[in-house]
Image (spheres, rainbow, N blue to C red):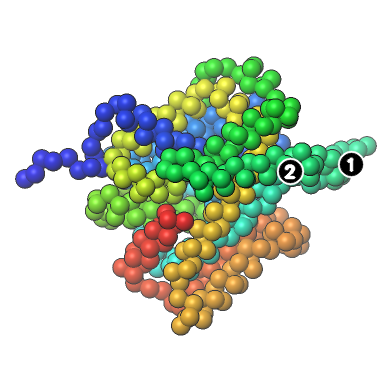
Amino acid sequence: MSSEVHPVDRKLPVPRLVVLGLQHVLVMYAGAVAVPLIIGRALKLSPEDIAFLISADLFACGLATLVQCIGLPGVGIRLPVMMGVTFAAVGPMLSMAGSPDIGLLGIYGSVIVAGLFAIIVAPFISRLLPLFPPVVTGTIIMVIGISLMRVGINWAGGGLPTLTRVVDGVPGAFPNPAYGQLQGLGIALFVLLVILALLKWGSGFISNVAVLLGIIAGAVLATTLGVMHFEKVASAAWADIVVPFRFGAPKFLLVPSITMCIVMIVVMIESLGMFLALGEMTDRKIDQQALARGLRADGVGTLLGGIFNTFPYTSFSQNVGLVGVTGVRSRWVTATGGAIMLLLGLMPKMSALVEAVPQVVLGGAGLVMFGMVAATGARILTAVDFKTNRFNLFVVAISVGFGMIPLVSQNFFKQLPSQLHPLLESGILLAAIAAVALNAFFNGLGTAESAKADAAQTAAAAEHA
């Protein structure tokens, strides 16, 4: 019997672990902090509260990554995976944030329920694979990117086009005077051009962190122009703890909880594809038990997210791609990255620095990040047979149409019960439901084996996008 250690389990020298782990952190950092920024600003939280959301997110990222890479009994796939907040939950959470009856505490309640739900259903998710062939997953991911582009565009514009103000006791919408100013648009364009230049002429590590370097360059320019301010950074503590339930006891509401559970099903299907891709890349056989452990870790990470004031977690595809680029297969590298994320979460000054970055700077990066999500979905769809199976065209076309309803008209479902609005106002979930239903109607259900092959193909396309 060979005593040779598998590359996945090999422990590298500490200095190399730190450098390679930091590389994984840098690749995912911009995406990791984007969701708390989006949700915090949608809820109109104070800069201090948004900074705390970022700290909590980084802390929970670290915990979830350690659980996934090192593992607990029955939990964790023990592959080189970095965990981060999923963008798939942003649409539903934005809808919840806009409801005074739900708010942040309702979001946290739905996240906790979704985490428990994921832990319970993890062993059964593989049976749902026939519902999610590439025509469905590609459509969903493309709609996610298109939906998030609205956020990136408004960032580049300097916030929201209109602001709600109370005049004589009556709330009303007024134009945002800072929206669309030339200086802000110029900064966003500068960030975009820096990222594009690094992607074209940078190589290796520089290309991998082009988005982060573009944000740093934009922050430097914004500071020079007097747009970025550091008062909150100066007053923030160097170290602090992340307190569970900092904003109060979570509210457990039926429709938001069901909505988030549906999101988790989509997230777990995406994770399953990533796990299969990683198994191929690392030459580690992934059986049914390993998949169940990995998906259960998604649930544990999401549960920890709800407890520690943050959001649902999944494996980050850009880090899966980094494993393929570097050829470093050790799970202890990403575990080290998780430890670095955890430490960053305990440093509020770093979180306050991130929160101080103007929206126009993030806008230039958002156009790239969210556009790449849409492009990833489009790339997955290139593997779909549209030539001999014209029904696939209808699956994509109609599902995208459903996904655009909340973006085009916020009052489309106004006459329906308010309890359904968090579900109906999420273009992502509408597209997912439509795509699954239409694919089942036109194409029927495939076998479990063909579904697993489709998931691996989907993950490979996403990883190379």
Which is nearer the eye, 112 or 365?
365
Report if the CB atoms under discs 2 and 1 are less than 8 Å apart.
Answer: no
Q: Is residue 81 above or below residue 452?
A: above
Position of residue 6 in the picture relative to residue 18 (left or right): left
The residue where tag 1 is placed is 170
Q: Of helix, strand and loop, which one carries label 1?
A: strand
Residue type at tag 2: Leu
Query: Whole-percent x and y of residue 344?
Result: 48, 27
Q: Please tell me the numbered disc located at residue 363.
A: none
Q: Is residue 98 visible?
A: no
- Furthest residue toward right: 168
Q: Is residue 15 above or below residue 379?
A: above
| Residue at x-position 40% and y-position 68% | 130
Which is nearer the eye, 231 or 207?
207
Label 2, residues with CA under 10 Å away: few <14, some 14-19, many ≥20:
many
| Residue at x-position 47% and y-position 36% | 26
Position of residue 52 in the picture relative to residue 318 (left or right): right
Query: Mark 1 or mark 2, which is nearer the start of the sequence?
Result: 1
Q: Is residue 332 above or below residue 1?
A: above
Residue type at tag 1: Val
Q: Of helix, strand and loop, which one carries label 2?
A: helix
- Furthest residue toward front: 201
Query: Whole-percent x and y of residue 131?
Result: 44, 67
| Residue at x-position 77% and y-position 38% | 183
Q: CA distance from mark 2 to mark 1?
A: 32 Å
Q: Is residue 300 above or below residue 230?
A: below
Label 1, residues with CA under 10 Å away: few <14, some 14-19, many ≥20:
few
Q: Is residue 268 visible?
A: yes
Q: Please tell me the numbered disc located at residue 185.
A: 2
